[in-house]
Amino acid sequence: MKAGIVGLPNVGKSTLFNCLSNAKAQSANFPFCTIEPNIGVVNVPDPRINKLEELVKPERVQMATVDIVDIAGLVKGASKGEGLGNQFLGNIRECNAIIHVLRCFDNDNIVHVDGNVNPIRDKETIDIELQLKDLETVEKRLEKVNRAAKTGNKEAQTEKALLDRIRESLLQAKSARTIIPQGNDEEVLMESFQLITAKPVLYVCNVDENSAVNGNKYVDQVRELVKDEDAEVIILSVGAEADITELESYEERQVFLEDMGLTEPGASVLIRAAYKLLKQQTYFTAGVKEVRAWTINIGSTAPQAAGVIHTDFEKGFIRAEVISYEDYVQYGSEAKAKEAGKFKVEGKEYIVKDGDVMHFRFNV
């Protein structure tokens, strides 16, 4: 599962990517410096794993991760192949969610591709290009399905009805994610269309350091614009985040954050939000060899969660032994949680909860 960072050139995408990832994307004051998409595997900050480490004292700790992709800046006409349009659109189609960076700061030294700072216009530029590309996809699909629908094919008629609704929405400059699928058939179809504007989105307002806590007039404009979208807005001072990552010690970073009025780096907030955007959650395994956070899709069953460790665990699944994170911490160990009757044995139908501490029994 990957979240792609998108935006116009020079809004801070590559600098943000560098803050999030150990991989170093090029960062320069001119458009298109990121030619190939850069992928960073980023640890998901989670205080729960620190607590489990404190209690279990394992030999090693493995955090959950999320893949972040830095994608080349998009310009007007990208849907027709302008700039690096085709490449951009291909890269973003492969991502599962979108982190849309908007420039919400004034700085005469950093050129804006359209001449002045206006996050509303910038958002609309990107939205329109993505919507035009989706419209092209929908119309091609409608050409194929129309003939079958006229013959009375029920499946084709269902698909045509959904495509017509999406097309109407796109023509009104509304993204495909505003269309709510009716029933399981439409959900499956919607997934199969692989529309770019159907992907969940998170807006990152890149602000100056002084606006990192409360935002500014540009952030207010963005919040007002997206209030009807099912999307989160995060304030981040990408320049300050870059400065934080340069500091050597944890103590220095904390002092820097306190001076800014923050309790943690904005990058940590963003990574957790991206994880949530991808509809992912964490369960833990905890033993003296290793405490580890495992990533699963929200709604996964116990066998599916076991399969993340190894496919044999899923194939030969017998049962899951589960202690909730809260109970594990309250009683201080697996043994004491068991003594208190907080140890549960669950079967194949069990839906794993975020934070469950689990062992699996299997037989292959």
Image: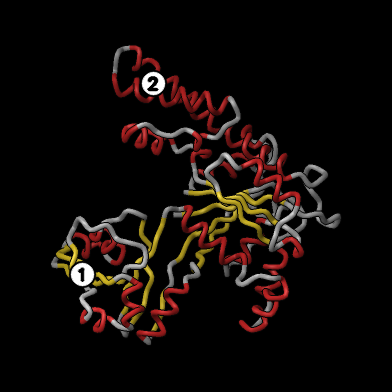
For the point 53% across and 62% down, the residue is 271
Disc 1 designates what residue? 344
- Left or right: residue 272 versus residue 319 is right
Res. 113 image quadrant: top right
For the point 37% across and 31% down, the residue is 182
Residue 98 lies, in percent from the top left, at: 54, 49
Is residue 58 visible from the viewing direction of this image? no
- Left or right: residue 14 versus residue 283 is right
Indicate the amino acid at tag 2.
Answer: Val
Disc 2 designates what residue? 145
In the rendered view, would you say 17 is above or below 159?
A: below
Q: Quadrant of the N terminus?
A: bottom left
Tally the marks.
2
- Left or right: residue 28 versus residue 94 is right
Which mark is in front, 1 or 2? 1
Indicate the amino acid at tag 1.
Answer: Lys
Mark 2: secondary structure: helix
For the point 31% across and 71% down, the residue is 357
Graded by Cα atoms within 10 Å as few (under 14), some (14 to 19) or many (20 or more), the crowding at tag 2 reads some
Res. 328 image quadrant: bottom left
Residue 217 lies, in percent from the top left, at: 76, 50
Is residue 329 visible from the viewing direction of this image? yes
Q: CA distance from mark 1 to mark 2?
A: 50 Å
Residue 348 lies, in percent from the top left, at: 18, 58
Question: In the rendered view, how is the structure colored?
Answer: secondary structure
Q: Earlier in the sequence, mark 1 or mark 2?
A: 2
Mark 1: secondary structure: strand
Graded by Cα atoms within 10 Å as few (under 14), some (14 to 19) or many (20 or more), the crowding at tag 1 reads few
